[in-house]
């Protein structure tokens, strides 16, 4: 008998969304990983990576494997999973590579098991994948990946997820090929911030949420300002200030660092502007002789998506 | 010839809305001041206070007079205003008493002048009233008074006002008769806050805005948490912790300090709960032998309202 098998598309995600440090996330359509998950009856998890990123295949250490271990430990059955991951989201890009694996694995597994978990439960399982890959149970990328669209983590403990309706916007992403360690990007943040800066930030976060929900691109644009992390973290990304200035110059709504970087994203109302921003990004990094990838994509309102299923 | 004259209702406002320190405000229906404004041709501003709060009648020092001085200075005409204020919102209550005078004066004056200003311009004029009364050009109360409903000040400089659609909710207010100086309530706040606390706060602010816009009372309730100002300011208000605990006990959504206090407000889904909260408040302050006023009212979506007009 053939095992039940499913293939899912696991999209990249942009954490923080400029002013929403540690609370906002956004799912985008491109890049994405492809993951195949097969239900087995040997009680084990077997991982095959078809990309060459040397990711650990020990389930406990793998972003897709660890959440499945948690799911299986609660089920008390003899079932197992065989995972095949084709990774296109580069680890360390700031585009939620481990989050995509974790989110994809739990959505696929849940579907194979007969949709027995809520999305919030899937987020909790997926956080085990972030812990395996990054050492911390961060939730913003996996939440955006599982729910799709723009998501707010109102609170981490207890976990309180708020999907934020958002308009159709275009997203331009540049991933300069440098490494920014998430742990270092967190270390350089100040443990204490000025109350006046914090007030500015929560004015902007509230404005961004209202802007998305009202479909008010002017308000979205004005709210895309980060006085907390960007002033410190942008220094780790060569060309950041120029990328931002030139993209604003061609008419993007705004943007900033994706997650803890090094990828930088910009939001636009239309595709022509998003493509013009891409050109600016390419020119700047070509001038800096810094290898880079760019993407012109959209907000992905679906999140992890099943693209193939066989008995 | 009789002068043009108008009478407006100037409602109380609740600044901060628990988690939105310095950015959120809410207009309520009760208590309110009544203000009569008469257009004159002597180029002067004459103020008459019919209440006994000994408020200054020098226009430059009066919350209603100072904004009118600013309006007149820009008009270059010989017109003046005669103001009669019946004040029911006690100065120093934390319910936006000076803001109500300032908001009422500019809305009334604008109407008498033929509606020549935008609401944002009226807010800017009204801020002169806050400066006259409180020494700072604060905008949250006057914005809520002029726009009505729930308002977000995304940014003070430049001024960026975002009206936040909100459901019909009931508001219970208790004003214990003690004095909390706004300047002191600001002084006791820390100049720096923990980044982890700031993140909690902007998660809550974003959640509260989303909750209002989605009409999700559960989310509103969970978001009404203040980890920045309340832990410090609540100590200035006798009975605060008990008021909050007992009101939560009878089923309010949540609440906290109104502005910098001493008034405390609670939001409820229905009038019965709002009245039960009022009973709890009365019992607590009676037990403490502390004179107090209470109000059971609603979110006021209209803001300053014209109630009478002649010629």
Image (cartoon, coloured by chain):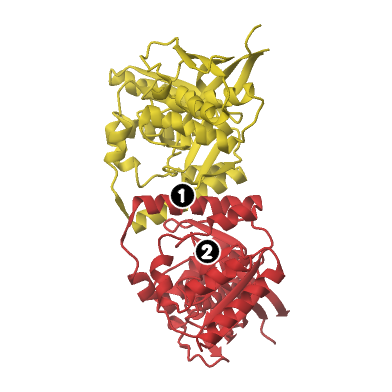
Chain colours: A yellow, B red
B307 is higher (above) or lower (below) than A43: below
Looking at the rendered image, the disc whose residue lies closer to the viewer, 1 or 2, is: 2
Please give the label number shown on residue A224.
Answer: none
Residue B259 seen by the camera: yes
Instruction: Please name whichever residue, A18 or A251, is drawn nearer the observer in this view of the structure.
Output: A18
Q: In which quarter of the image is residue A241?
A: top left
Which residue is rendered at x = 45% and y = 16% of the image?
A88
In the picture, the quarter occupied by the N terminus of chain B is bottom right
Instruction: Please name whichever residue, B169 or B246, is drawn nearer the observer in this view of the structure.
Output: B246
Picture coordinates of residue B57, whole percent (x, y): 48, 88
Q: How crowded is mark 1: few (under 14 residues within 10 Å), some or many (20 or more)?
A: many
Please give the label number shown on residue A204.
Answer: 1
Image side of residue B275 versus residue B140, left or right: right
Q: How crowded is mark 2: few (under 14 residues within 10 Å), some or many (20 or more)?
A: many
Which residue is rendered at x = 64% and y = 31% of the image?
A116
Picture coordinates of residue B185, whole percent (x, y): 38, 73
Looking at the image, the residue that sits furthest to the top is A1
Image side of residue B115 versus residue A249, left or right: right
A131 is higher (above) or lower (below) than B177: above
Q: In which quarter of the image is residue A29?
A: top right
Residue at disc 1, secondary structure = helix
Q: Badge 2 is on which residue? A: B17
| Residues at marks 1 and 2 touching, judged by CB atoms closer than 8 Å | no
């Amino acid at each position: 008998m053939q095992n039940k098998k499913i293939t899912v598309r696991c999209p990249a995600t942009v954490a923080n969304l400029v002013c929403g440090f540690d609370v906002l996330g956004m799912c985008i359509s491109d890049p994405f990983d492809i993951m195949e998950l097969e239900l087995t009856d040997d009680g084990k998890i077997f991982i095959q990576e078809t990309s060459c990123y040397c990711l650990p295949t020990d389930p406990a250490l793998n972003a897709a494997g660890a959440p499945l271990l948690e799911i299986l430990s609660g089920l008390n059955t003899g079932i197992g999973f065989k995972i095949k991951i084709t990774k296109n989201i580069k680890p360390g890009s700031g585009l939620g590579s481990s989050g995509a694996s974790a989110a994809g694995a739990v959505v696929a597994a849940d579907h194979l098991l007969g949709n027995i978990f809520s999305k919030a439960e899937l987020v909790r399982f997926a956080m085990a994948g972030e812990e395996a890959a990054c050492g911390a149970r961060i939730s913003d990328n996996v939440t955006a990946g599982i729910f799709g669209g723009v998501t707010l983590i109102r609170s981490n403990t207890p976990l309180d997820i708020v999907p934020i309706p958002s308009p159709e916007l275009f997203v331009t992403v540049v991933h300069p090929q440098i490494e920014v360690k998430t742990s270092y990007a967190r270390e350089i943040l100040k443990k204490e911030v000025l109350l006046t800066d914090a007030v500015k930030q929560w004015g902007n976060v509230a404005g961004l949420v209202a802007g998305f929900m009202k479909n008010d691109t002017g308000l979205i644009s004005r709210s895309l300002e980060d006085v907390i992390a960007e002033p410190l973290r942008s220094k780790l990304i060569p060309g950041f200030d120029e990328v931002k200035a030139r993209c604003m110059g061609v008419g993007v709504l705004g943007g900033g660092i994706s997650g803890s970087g090094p990828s930088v994203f910009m939001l636009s109302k239309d595709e022509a502007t998003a493509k013009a921003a891409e050109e600016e990004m390419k020119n700047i990094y070509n001038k800096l002789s810094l290898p880079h990838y760019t993407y012109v994509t959209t907000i992905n309102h679906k999140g992890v998506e099943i693209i193939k299923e066989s008995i």
